[in-house]
Image (cartoon, grey):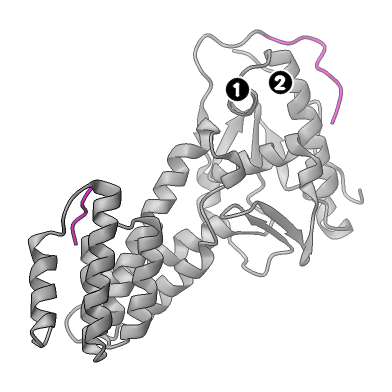
């Protein structure tokens, strides 16, 4: 078993198709292991409290930003440190072996050079993310048992957690609600999730392999939330808000015919029949441009019903 001591001990105290509805080098570097190292689930973190008013705030949705007590930390000047923090943020529930970090972030460099970059990056992070003497005794980036992690006992506000927590709350409430249940808590949770999603995950790392699947997963969840939220808004008679939410979804998936139908119905129920009919033209053009298809039968029928003045 390979055992490499941490050259940086923690600081001490005082320092679309059609869709349905820092830094000495270790004296000896071991070779890469034959089998790929693992990302180890950190079950302790499941019990760590998340404080939304934390001193440190990390934003991974949209432009990557780090704030300490409301002041932006210019990590863009430290590209290696920024990359390590991004990776640890995405795997905040796990202990990450140092080889994993090197191979993911610097896949085309020798292990020894990658470890040097990692040590420098961690040193920078411990310096830049101190946020004053109060937190310097508990570094955010912690090393133990050959692995790095975001320390679970340091309060950090992470927008990924905010988004996924709100989404889970909304979906849970939506799943168990019964007829006649007050929809306001579900709608509020979904609206909180939509607000937390400032943009796609780490767009400046668009082609980094370690971001691709997670980016798609989060985007899919975001679109699911938009779809459910728009439907609930219709069911509560908030048609204008439903239309706005529907268009947010169409900006990312312009061929969602179920959403086009929802928008047309909402316009019609607001007494704006002409806008409903014009939206059918917009939908038809979008389907032809993106997929080379015509609207489905349900859309055509809805258009006909609205054109004839029927209540939809």
Q: CA distance from mark 1 to mark 2?
A: 8 Å
**12, 184: nearer the viewer:** 184
Determine if residue 290 is in view. Answer: yes
Are the two marked residues, 1 and 2, in contact with CB atoms closer than 8 angstroms?
Answer: yes
Q: Is residue 295 above or below residue 309?
A: above
Q: For mark 2, does the 10 Å Cα neighbourhood hold few (<14), some (14 to 19), or many (20 or more) residues?
A: many
Q: Is residue 141 above or below residue 283?
A: above
**195, 244: nearer the viewer:** 244
The range drawn in magenta is 17-30
Percent from the top left, x then y, of residue 274?
A: 24, 83
Examine the structure image and report whether residue 15 is included in the region drawn in magenta.
Answer: no
Q: For mark 1, does the 10 Å Cα neighbourhood hold few (<14), some (14 to 19), or many (20 or more) residues?
A: some
43 left or right of 253? right
Percent from the top left, x then y, of residue 154?
A: 69, 55
**304, 36: nearer the viewer:** 304
Percent from the top left, x then y, of residue 233?
A: 31, 80
Percent from the top left, x then y, of residue 208?
A: 55, 33
Q: Which mark is residue 103?
A: 1
| First of labels 1, 2 by sequence position | 1
Q: Which mark is residue 114?
A: 2
Determine if residue 181 is in view. Answer: no
Q: Is residue 234 above or below residue 6?
A: below
Give the residue drawn at x 86%, y 22%. 24
Give the residue drawn at x 21%, y 77%. 277
């Amino acid at each position: 078993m390979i055992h490499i001591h941490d050259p940086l001990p923690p600081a001490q105290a005082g320092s679309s198709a059609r869709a349905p509805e820092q830094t000495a080098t270790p004296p000896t570097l071991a070779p890469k292991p034959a089998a790929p190292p693992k990302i180890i689930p950190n079950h302790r973190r499941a019990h760590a409290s998340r404080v939304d008013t934390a001193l440190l705030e990390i934003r991974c949705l949209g432009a990557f930003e780090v704030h300490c007590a409301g002041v932006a930390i210019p990590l863009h000047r430290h590209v290696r440190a920024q990359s390590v923090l991004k990776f640890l943020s995405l795997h905040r529930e796990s202990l990450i072996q140092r080889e994993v970090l090197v191979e993911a972030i610097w896949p085309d460099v020798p292990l020894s050079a990658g470890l040097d970059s990692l040590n420098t990056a961690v040193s920078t992070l411990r310096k830049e993310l101190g946020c004053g003497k109060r937190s310097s005794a508990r570094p955010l980036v912690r090393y133990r048992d050959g692995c790095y992690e975001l320390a679970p006992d340091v309060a950090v506000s992470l927008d990924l957690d905010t988004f996924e927590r709100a989404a889970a709350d909304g979906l849970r409430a939506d799943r168990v609600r019964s007829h006649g249940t007050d929809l306001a808590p579900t709608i509020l949770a979904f609206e909180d999730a939509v607000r937390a999603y400032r943009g796609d995950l780490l767009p400046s790392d668009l082609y980094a392999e370690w971001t691709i699947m997670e980016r798609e997963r989060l985007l899919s969840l975001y679109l699911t939330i938009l779809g459910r939220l728009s439907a609930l808004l219709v069911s509560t008679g908030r048609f204008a808000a439903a239309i706005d939410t529907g268009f947010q979804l169409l900006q990312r998936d312009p061929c969602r015919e179920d959403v086009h139908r929802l928008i047309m119905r909402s316009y019609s129920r607001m007494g704006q029949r002409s806008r409903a009919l014009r939206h059918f033209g917009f939908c038809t053009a979008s389907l032809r441009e993106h997929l080379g298809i015509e609207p489905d039968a349900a859309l055509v029928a809805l258009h006909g019903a609205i054109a004839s003045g029927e209540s939809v």
